[in-house]
């Protein structure tokens, strides 16, 4: 089995005259067909969201990806961030996966 918890940290650094950055968190089973995967904010970890993220400031934001056993889970083997627009914004991501004890 896969991990019991997956966290994604998206860190953005704003350069000169930045524009809004639009990004989707996407998953795929086969690496060809991609779809938005569910995520939750740390403020509302039980509320699954599938909407495109809008980044306008330099900040590090943590998201909990919807996982197995959660009602909105859609299986995937690969993850990617799909950018619709990005001007003068540097984005770094960190993926954390954990298994429960036992």
Image (cartoon, helix red, strand yellow):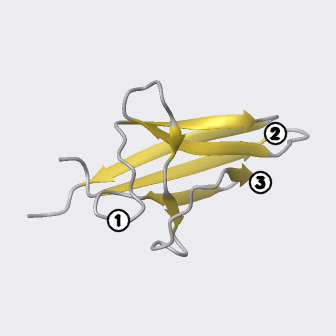
Residue at which label 2 appears: 15
Dot 3: element: loop
Q: Quadrant of the C terminus?
A: bottom left
Q: Secondary structure at mark 1?
A: loop
Q: Is residue 80 above or below residue 65?
A: above
- Mark 1 vs mark 3: in front: 1
Number of residues whose C-alpha sits closer than 10 Å to that of mark 2, classed few (under 14), some (14–19) or many (20 or more): few
Displayed quadrant of residue 66: bottom left
Mark-to-mark CA distance, 1 and 2:
38 Å
Residue beneath label 3, please? 57
Q: Is residue 77 left or right of residue 15?
A: left
Q: Earlier in the sequence, mark 1 or mark 2?
A: 2
Judging from the image, what secondary structure is the residue with disc 2 in?
Answer: loop
Left or right: 35 as drawn, with respect to 56: left
- Could you tell me if the residues under marks 2 and 3 are in contact, i.e. CB atoms within 8 Å? no
**Left or right of 40 in this view: 85:** right
Q: Judge by depth and name the residue closer to the eye, 53 or 87.
A: 53
Q: Which of disc 3 and disc 1 is earlier in sequence?
A: 3
| Residue 22 shown left or right of residue 71 in the figure | right
* Residue 88 rendering spot, x and y as whole percentages: 81, 35
Q: Which residue is mark 1?
A: 70
Mark toward the viewer: 1 or 2: 1
Residue at 57% x, 38% y: name it: 81
Residue 100 point in image, percent of width and height:
19, 62
Instruction: Specify which label sits upstream in the sequence, 2 or 3.
Output: 2
Q: Seen from this angle, which residue lies furthest right?
A: 17
* Residue extending farthest top: 32
Q: Residues within 10 Å of mark 3 (few under 14, many from 20)?
A: some
Q: Residue at x 66, y 50 (%)?
A: 52
Give residue 95's mark. Answer: none
Q: Residue at x 55, y 45 (%)?
A: 25
């Amino acid at each position: 089995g896969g991990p019991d918890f997956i966290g994604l940290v998206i860190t953005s650094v704003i350069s000169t005259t930045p524009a809004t950055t639009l990004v989707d968190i996407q998953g795929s089973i086969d690496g060809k067909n991609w779809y938005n995967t569910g995520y939750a904010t740390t403020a509302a970890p039980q509320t699954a969201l599938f909407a495109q993220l809008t980044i306008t400031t330099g900040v590090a934001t943590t998201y909990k990806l919807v996982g197995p056993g959660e009602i909105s889970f859609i299986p995937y083997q690969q993850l990617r961030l799909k950018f619709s627009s990005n001007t003068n914004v540097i984005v770094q991501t960190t993926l954390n996966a954990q298994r429960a004890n036992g």
